[in-house]
Image (cartoon, rainbow, N blue to C red):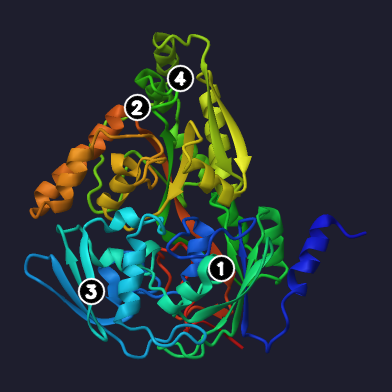
Amino acid sequence: MKTRLGIALAALMAASPALAAGTTLNVGMGSADAGKLDPHVATSTPDKGLLHWMFNGLVRIKPGEASPEFIEPDIAKSWTSSEDGLTWVFQLRDDVECHGDYGKIDAEDVVYSLNRSANPDVSSFSKDYTAFDSVEATGPLEVTIKLKEKVPSLLGLLVPYHGGNIVCQDAVEALGEEYQRTPIGTGPFMFAEYQPQQYVKLVANPEYFRGEPKIKEIFYRYIPSDASRDLAFQSGEIDMIYGKQEQTWVERIKDVPGTRVVVMKPGEMSVIHLNMTMPPLDDIRVRRAVAHAVNRDAMVQFKGPDVTLAAISPVPEGHLGYTADVPTYEYSIEKAKELLAEAGHPDGVTIKAIHTTLPGMLSTMEALQALLSEANINLEIETVEHATFHEQIRKDMSQVTHYAAARFPVADVYLSQFFHSDAIVGTPTAITNFSHCAVADAEIEAARTETDPKKQLEYWAEAQRKIMDEVCAVPIVQSMQLWAWKDTLDLGVEVNGSLNLSPPVTEAASFSE
């Protein structure tokens, strides 16, 4: 008798036509389905990882790394900047082909891409580009970017991550709305097919400017069940697997013969954003009660000390501008209950959260739910599919929003996207300010234009202190990215990290005989 799991696994591989051994890569992703595959719109971890293999930027972070110290040329072969840091000129390669029959990338495509990234009517990341004054083609293969003000890391906005992905203008205009399901890039792998709730198929780009990939096709399979995904990997049906962000997963998968497990940077920082416009969270005493009811040590132990770091600031540890000198709220059920009573809730409160079904995130939220209940804080969780979660929280529909994010590792990015008033959800300039926080606008803005590095760090530190004093959000933990793959798969680089949260599958990746 076949179990439902057995039937699912049997169907898993039925869709993939057999190629020569060692040319097909099967990837198991912990999501139910694809979201939007337009790189200037996609915000979820599963989508960003997939797009990472299809697109280039003007520059990139060296494959296998996540730090901006490893930025190197990509579509641009060289660049210069003015002494004041406000004018940047990029010289482009002349051999970068768009997927399909859309021709070579030129300066006009880059101008179109960056203007599209900055357009709030199109892009999820437009707020990142507000400092851009103009982007112009100053030659067939030359692009000049002029800034209104100096930004902490211009090159960080130009890596193939979020708005830095370069698209092909002719493809976007020809495909229209279909572009969200048929992305056309310039990377080592090309979009070939999408089967809802099953997989996205990619094929090798024979015209890739760094050389034709050795792997000829990739099946990026949506397997939301951790157990099903693990079983598919252990049985050999999956070559590479997205791991559950828990210590026990690492320990278990390491024991699978012929397996390599990698703990990748950057960590996704889990933060509980408290909507300060919705009662009872409009009372700072209730928000502080929530903060006192969170036991970070317990959360680190729950998630695993080898794969998790406690988070105490709105900016992740290790990022430029991070400070630990912020107001903290020691774990104290007694203090939490006292604050609730002072706020007029002696019998506790109920707060509600819309939440993704993505297993790694959901397990974190359920653990927090148990901790909060000890302080008579009843957290009601309404689960929805991951793409729906992103849609609804951006409509300001949730009192509590658990968001797990990895961003370019500079404080300005986190502070601007999550805690500046311009980023408040439901507004024309919305990004991901779910709490409606506005207490640190002045410091965030001052840091962007400050030319003295020491003063810039001071502004960022003060912004973090104000945000934590107001309890706009409660940082919980940083969870490292966990992946595993067969040791017969050689990615061609040492993998320490990936800003896009997926392993670097490039033209260099191959299977050993």
- Report the Cα–Cα distance between label 1 and label 4: 52 Å
Q: Which residue is mark 1?
A: 178
Q: Which residue is mark 4?
A: 333
Query: The residue under label 2 is which amino acid type?
Result: Tyr
**Does dot 3 land on a helix, a strand or a loop?**
strand
Disc on the earlier residue, 1 or 4: 1
Dot 2 crowding, Cα within 10 Å, few <14, some 14–19, many 20+: many
In the shown orientation, is residue 67 left or right of residue 49?
left
**Does dot 4 land on a helix, a strand or a loop?**
helix
Identified at 30% across, 32% down, the residue is 468
**Does dot 2 land on a helix, a strand or a loop?**
loop
C-beta proximity under 8 Å, tags 4 and 3: no
> Where 87 sits versus 213, above or below?
above
Q: Which residue is mark 2?
A: 329
Quarter of the figure with residue 70? bottom left
- Report the Cα–Cα distance between label 1 and label 2: 48 Å
Dot 4 crowding, Cα within 10 Å, few <14, some 14–19, many 20+: many
Disc on the earlier residue, 2 or 3: 3
Disc on the earlier residue, 1 or 3: 3
Query: The residue under label 4 is which amino acid type?
Result: Ile
Number of the front mark, 2 or 3: 3
- Whether residue 159 is visible: no
